[in-house]
Amino acid sequence: MGPGYFPLLLGVILAIIGGIVMARALVVETPDGDPIGRWAWKPLAFIIAANFLFGILLGGWPLLGIPAMGLIIAIVVLTFVAALAGDEFKFIEVLILAILLAVGSWAAFVWGLNLQFQVWPSFISG
């Protein structure tokens, strides 16, 4: 067993549990016998786009000339795009949440765990 054994095993177990939950969700009967309904495409698209943008902004995409924007901007963009998935969008509430998540992530990962993340874009931090 090497250092990647536990994460691999944990990933396989989580994939199996996710498959079971998905299979049960697709065959569940509603109490009245009505069909379950349409897929919620808007939330699905915004949540996937938020995660995709987070990865691009955190690490950059050199092939397209997109520089790494850093942890703080990536988390703020992630929060705003994910908030668009809901039915209500209140700018002030999302801004407060984004600031709290960015500061908390910085405190946990950069300050607390001393991980080497680019916190700000290079044109700000130099």
Image (cartoon, grey):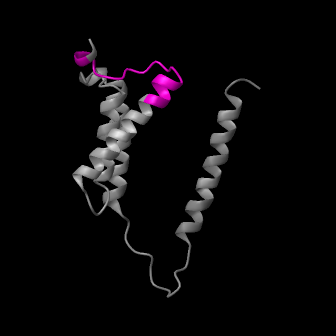
Number of marks in picture: 0
Residue found at x 29% / y 63%: 87
Q: Position of residue 113 (x, y in %)?
A: 54, 24
Quarter where residue 35 is shown: bottom left
Q: Position of residue 90 (x, y in %)?
A: 24, 56
Name the image quarter holding the C terminus.
top left
Quarter where residue 75 is shown: top left
Quarter where residue 54 is shown: top left
Asked whether 59 or 119 is in front, the reply is 119
Name the image quarter holding the N terminus.
top right
Extent of the magenta region? 107-124
Q: Position of residue 36 (x, y in %)?
A: 45, 76
Asked whether 1 or 58 is in front, the reply is 58
Left or right: where does residue 48 sit relative to residue 15?
left
Left or right: where does residue 67 sit relative to residue 110?
left
Residue found at x 33% / y 52%: 45
In this rendering, the answer to whether 81 lies above or below 63 is below
Is residue 54 inside the magenta stretch? no
* Extreme residue toward the bottom, this view: 32
Q: Position of residue 62 (x, y in %)?
A: 30, 20
Left or right: where does residue 88 sit relative to residue 40?
left
In this rendering, the answer to whether 60 lies above or below 10 is above
Residue found at x 33% / y 42%: 98
In this rendering, the answer to whether 39 lies above or below 53 is below
* Extreme residue toward the top, this view: 126
Left or right: where does residue 94 sit relative to residue 27?
left
Asked whether 64 or 118 is in front, the reply is 118
